[in-house]
Image (spheres, grey):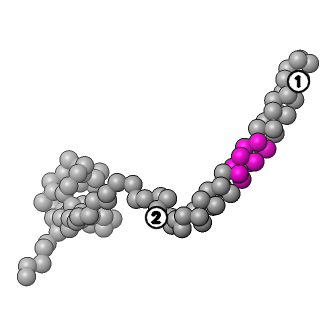
Amino acid sequence: MTAYKELLAQKATLDAQIEAAQAEAKAKAVTEARALIAEHGLTAADVFPAQGKKRKGSVGAPKYRDPASGATWTGRGKPPNWINGKDRGQFLIEMAKS
């Protein structure tokens, strides 16, 4: 049991040393990054460009409504539980005609 307690004490010491070294390395990296950003006049958009293109498009107007909860569904994708396996005609939303 003594060896186990000694190992736990060593682990705690190592964990503290790792945490201190990690904090020191992080502080140094932040200082270097700030210096480079200031030197080159970078903005957040320069450093962190948008990842991928975001789809712009319509999700679609709701076609079905659950009378009990008021939840809607466009008719696209997986049907929600409140309409799944039921006659969809009873859930249709009347569309206003222009």
Placement of 78 over or under 48, stated as above or below: above
Q: Position of residue 16 (x, y in %)?
A: 81, 39
Task: Tell which residue pokes out farthest to the front in this image.
Answer: 39
**Which residue occupies 8% across, 79% down?**
97
Q: Split into 4 quadrants, where in the image is the N terminus?
A: top right
Task: Tell which residue pokes out farthest to the right in this image.
Answer: 2
Q: Residue 5's mark?
A: 1
Can residue 46 be seen in this snapshot? yes
Q: Horizontal placement of 10 versus 78: left or right?
A: right
Q: Split into 4 quadrants, where in the image is the C terminus?
A: bottom left
Placement of 80 over or under 65, stated as above or below: above
**Which residue occupies 28% across, 53% down?**
80
**Residue 30 picture quarter:** bottom right
Marks 1 and 2 close (CB-CB < 8 Å): no
Q: Residue 26's mark?
A: none
Q: Position of residue 57 (x, y in %)?
A: 23, 64
Amino acid beneath label 1: Lys
Give whichever of discs 1 and 2 has the lower sequence position. 1
Tell whether position 25 is magenta: yes
**Residue 59 picture quarter:** bottom left
Q: Residues within 10 Å of mark 2 (few under 14, many from 20)?
A: few
Q: Position of residue 48 (x, y in %)?
A: 47, 58
In front here: 28 or 68?
28
**Which residue occupies 78% across, 36% down?**
15
Q: Secondary structure at mark 1?
A: helix
Range drawn in magenta = 20-28
Amino acid beneath label 2: Ala
**Which residue occupies 22% across, 65% down?**
58
Q: Residue 45's mark?
A: 2
